[in-house]
Amino acid sequence: MKIVAICGAGIGSSGILKVNAERVLKRLDIEATVIAADIGSLATVAGDAQVILTSAEFVDAIGKTFADVVVIENYFDTEELTAKLDAALG
Amino acid sequence: MALPPLPTEAIEIGAVVEDWRAAVSLAGDALVRSGAAKAGYAGEMIRMIEEHGPYVVIAPGLALAHARPGPDVLADGLAIIVLSEPVAFGHPHNDPVRVVLAIAIAKAGEHLAAVAGLANIFNDSTAIADLAAATTPEEVQRIMGVPS
């Protein structure tokens, strides 16, 4: 399974989403690859992704996709991430 | 995991700003003082927010200002600006911002260790309030777990 974390620069916020998503997935016992990327390279990295993690600002730019677009409000709240990833993948 | 350097000159407490641009600009100045970035980096961080919106407010009260690695980055570095009065970035859930954390990364691909370190600190939900209440740069360094 592939999960892509998207932000504007592809460093920083998407990196934090990646790190915390990996922690949560381990706890949920779900095997997945999480990639951090910037919105500009979304098309090349997210074609085969099942889930796109991002914040509300990028939903329009992400546009139509087969992936579940999961919007995260507090990037450091692993309970929010757990609930939303569990809902998307469970 | 090791954070980028956060020397005392990259920390400002009780900063008074009119708006989010001024807050990010101060964070850019702090990165210039510590030798992590050139003056142009502040403008790049501001442009990221103008272009993509206030997504950098990644948790209640905390903005993670950053731009891409590039010629304006001299070395990896962090800066922290604690605002005396919170300012709005326009984020629907996480406004107002009390702490601006700026990050400069010299090489793409080497940021993950740095942000993993940040996740370790801020996954503790009290860290943002502790930073907002800090009164000295040394206290900020202690909260961030970096040597002073």
Image (spheres, rainbow, N blue to C red):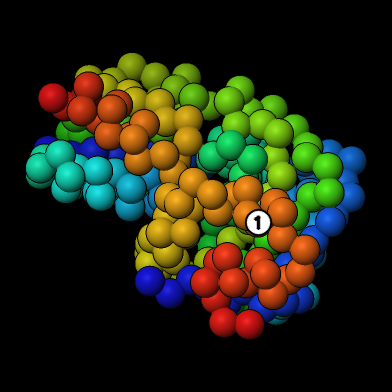
Q: Residue A21 location, x and y as percent?
A: 29, 44
Q: Answer above or below: position of B137 versus A6.
A: below
Q: Residue B105 location, x and y as percent?
A: 53, 66
The residue marked by circle 1 belongs to what chain?
B
Q: Depth check: give the residue in front, A3 or B43.
A: A3
Q: Answer above or below: position of B135 versus B130.
A: below
Q: Residues within 10 Å of mark 1 (few under 14, many from 20)?
A: many
Judge from the rendering whether residue B58 lies leftward or rightward of residue A54; answer left or right.
right
Tag 1 residue: B131
Which residue is at 65% across, 56% downward? B131
Q: Depth check: give the residue in front, B101 or B134.
A: B134
The answer to whether residue B3 of the structure is visible from this angle is yes
Report which quarter residue B49 is drawn in.
top right
The answer to whether residue A47 of the structure is visible from this angle is no
Q: Residue furthest top?
A: A64
Judge from the rendering whether residue B31 lies leftward or rightward of residue A16; answer left or right.
right
Q: Depth check: give the residue in front, B140 or A30.
A: B140
Q: Residue A90 location, x and y as percent?
A: 13, 24
Report which quarter residue B102 is drawn in.
bottom right
Q: Amino acid at mark 1?
A: Leu
Q: Residue B117 location, x and y as percent?
A: 42, 64
Judge from the rendering whether residue A89 lies leftward or rightward of residue B104; answer left or right.
left
Which residue is at 54% across, 39% downward? B59
SS for callout 1 = helix
Which residue is at 16% across, 48% downward? A26
Q: How many marks?
A: 1
Q: Answer above or below: position of B20 versus B130.
A: above
In what quadrant of the picture does the N terminus of chain A appear? Answer: top left
Which residue is at 85% across, 55% downward? B15
